[in-house]
Amino acid sequence: MSFTNSMTTMPGASGTTPGVFAQQDAAELVHLTRNGQVESRHSGAAVVTGPDGGVLATLGPADAVVFGRSALKPLQAIASLRLGAPLESRHIAIAAGSHRGSSRHRALVREILAAAGLDKTALQCPRAWPKDRRELLKMAARTRRPDGPRPNRLAFNCSGKHAAWLSACVAAGLQTESYLDLDHPLQREVFRVIEDYCGTEPVDVGVDGCGGPAPRLALAGLARGFGRIASAPERAAQGLPIDDHAIQVAVSMLRHPWAVQGKNSSNTRIMRELGLLAKSGADGVLVVAAPDGTAVAVKTLDGASRANNLVALNLLARFAPDQVDLPALRNVLDAVTPTVLGRGQPVGRTGLADPVLEVLSA
């Protein structure tokens, strides 16, 4: 399948702008209340897939097509491994992650590059500031520039993925200068992995925030692919045939959850405290999967992320109850669900909307 470097668009059935599903097709996912009154609502779509990849439940359009954004990184990491990138476990975790640019994260990226005989100048992701305020203060304290610290590519949240891609190119004898081009052998391998794991071809492709290709695919396919990665260690333990690279990615993310996002970030807490695989993507995408392969993919229509953890974790607990530690789940939800404050005190809550509650009670 071939793509152009800008998103291919199809004519809308009713003259609307083609792309993500329409507002009238979305399901309300959560609402936020303040002093007993609903202040905000978030709508979108969610799909639950089972261990066999079949669809168990949907909210919103069952055939929703979305940009997977950074939720695709575990699949992109598999492509790097397939091409021979010599990554250790902690390096695989940051290749599959969207880190916060801490000094520990930046050190991991440097290690990947150094092992490939490269340095940060080979990275083609944008420059960025660390997302953690404490890291910014540390950077400012260490700098010797008279005009202060500057953003750098190592701190960009996708630099681990880019470093792994460069490592794969060096290992496979491929050009590094053009590694982001859609027709580069590395990117062709990425699309093969997506098709292999998600069971569907991307509909089209755009350009991601990091500069790499941004495939657009069915939300159910995204959940299915993530579930197959999450279940790889368990399937291998049962003696079933499985791709060793999927095992490496799942084990590495769970072993080094801090490298996937950050010390107390939501993805990290879900993996560290619940043993579930979790990966968010920009503009309201989240995928969470249990060790048996049950997975939930969520996309909020407005691109906000505050609905996603509450929806995904509750759906996963409903459809894979033996895979989720319920007491631990309550603690995690308290930590990753936004609190509505007034004068610094709780005055409201984030709650599941009726369409989600109906699925949970069915």
Image (cartoon, rainbow, N blue to C red):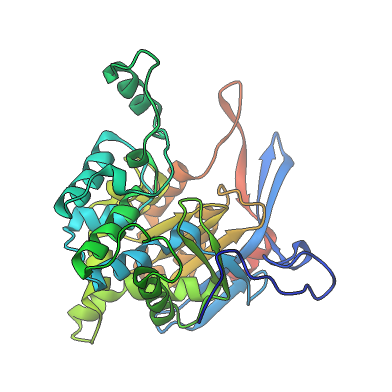
Check the picture and name the quadrant holding the C terminus. Answer: bottom right
Image position, residue 233 (x, y; %): 23, 73
Considering depth in this image, is 39 or 5 the residue closer to the camera? 5
Task: Kindly identify the residue that appears in the image at 18 percent across and 78 percent down.
Answer: 237
Image position, residue 102 (x, y; %): 31, 36
Image position, residue 213 (x, y; %): 48, 63
Could you tell whether 296 is left or right of 107 in the image?
Answer: right
Considering depth in this image, is 149 or 94 the residue closer to the camera? 149
Q: Quadrant of residue 276?
A: bottom left
Considering depth in this image, is 112 or 358 the residue closer to the camera? 112
Image position, residue 234 (x, y; %): 24, 75
Question: In the image as oriented, which residue stretches furthest toward the right?
Answer: 14
- Total label count? 0
Task: Kindly identify the residue that appears in the image at 32 percent across and 51 percent down.
Answer: 260
Could you tell whether 266 is left or right of 304 in the image?
Answer: left
Q: Quadrant of residue 324?
A: bottom left
Task: Kindly identify the residue that appears in the image at 54 percent across and 40 percent down.
Answer: 338
* Residue 292 appears in view: no
Rendered view: 191 above or below 148: below
* Residue 139 appears in view: yes
Rendered view: 229 above or below 148: below
